[in-house]
Image: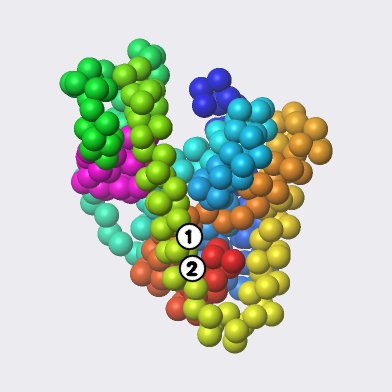
Amino acid sequence: LVSNWRIAILGTFFQIIIIVIALLILGTILGWPVERSILFGFVISLSSTAVVLKILEDRKEVDTKIGQDILGILLVQDLAVIPMLIILSLFGGETLSGGELALPIVGGLSIAAIVAVAFKKGGIPIPFAEAIQQDDELQVFAAILVCFGIALITGLLGLSPAFGAFVAGILIATSRETHWIHKNLNPFKVIFVAIFFVYVGMLINLNFIAENLIAISLLTLSVFLANTFFNAVVFRLMGDEWKDSIYSGALLSQIGEFSFVLAAIGLHDDIVSTFSYNMIISIIAL
């Protein structure tokens, strides 16, 4: 991620900005409120780490240049959810005190500092590492404890618990003593990814889709085409060939799991109506 910072950070920034601007222009034509256009831009700009990573693994492209560039953008997209959540909470009319606003910012900076230290020192030592390495059951429990522990901390700091689990993965992967975790947790990964897709399926309202099939189909196709084009332009600006740029843009063309969270916040804060929320959920799921 650090060696690829130019594409990961600048690429993600330009990608989000371009899509948000496009939705603002579209919203102006259609008479949408500004906050609704920005919400739609945020929702569309995020891609699914779970889906894309699975595709890259199946195609054995994780370690290729394209795979690493895409993973870098996916990771920064996940981090970008934090300012998106803050912006949407302000649009929702919530009056946030200085402390409430400062807490997630300070928390985010603190966690970023911890990750930076882990990178610089080649990992953060894990207590009782030698004992854990010799016990497969303790390995599983230790990994889950780290995951949920950091998720709890980020939740208390006003950040997303999912972001905490994400940071836990970075720290575990960086640590020298945790090379054994990936193998032992692989069965859990299969189960949790399956549960994720079941969850997405349970969000789909078949009656709503049937009643609005044409509109949903056209909007889903539009999202695929628009995201492929905008992402391809960003990759091209970053120096990739058009062929690779279009391929990378196509991989990032679907909408990510964090967009479900953004859509729910939009509904809760009256940024979108129930009809628009169901439309967003249907498009994301499909």
Q: Which residue is mark 1?
A: 197
Image location of residue 236, percent across then percent down: 75, 36
Does 75 sit above or below residue 37?
above
Give the residues in magenta: 145-169
Per the picture, the main secondary structure of the magenta-coloured stretch is helix
Alpha carbons under labels 2 and 1: distance apart? 6 Å
Taking depth in this image into account, of 89 and 139 the one nearest to the observer is 139
Residue at screen point 81% across, 38% down: 242
Image location of residue 223, percent across then percent down: 66, 61
Taking depth in this image into account, of 143 and 124 the one nearest to the observer is 143
Does 119 sit above or below residue 221?
above
Q: For the residues labelled 2 and 1, say whether their Cβ atoms are less than 8 Å apart.
A: yes
Residue 239 seen in the figure? yes
Residue at screen point 25% across, 43% down: 148
Image location of residue 265, percent across then percent down: 39, 63
Is residue 229 left or right of 72 when viewed as pictured?
right
Dot 2, how many residues are within 10 Å of its Cα: few (below 14), some (14-19), or many (20+)? some
Residue 201, numbered label: 2
Is residue 102 left or right of 278 when viewed as pictured?
left
Amino acid at pointer 1: Phe
Residue at screen point 66% across, 39% down: 59
Amino acid at pointer 2: Gly
Taking depth in this image into account, of 154 and 84 the one nearest to the observer is 154
Residue 109 seen in the figure? no
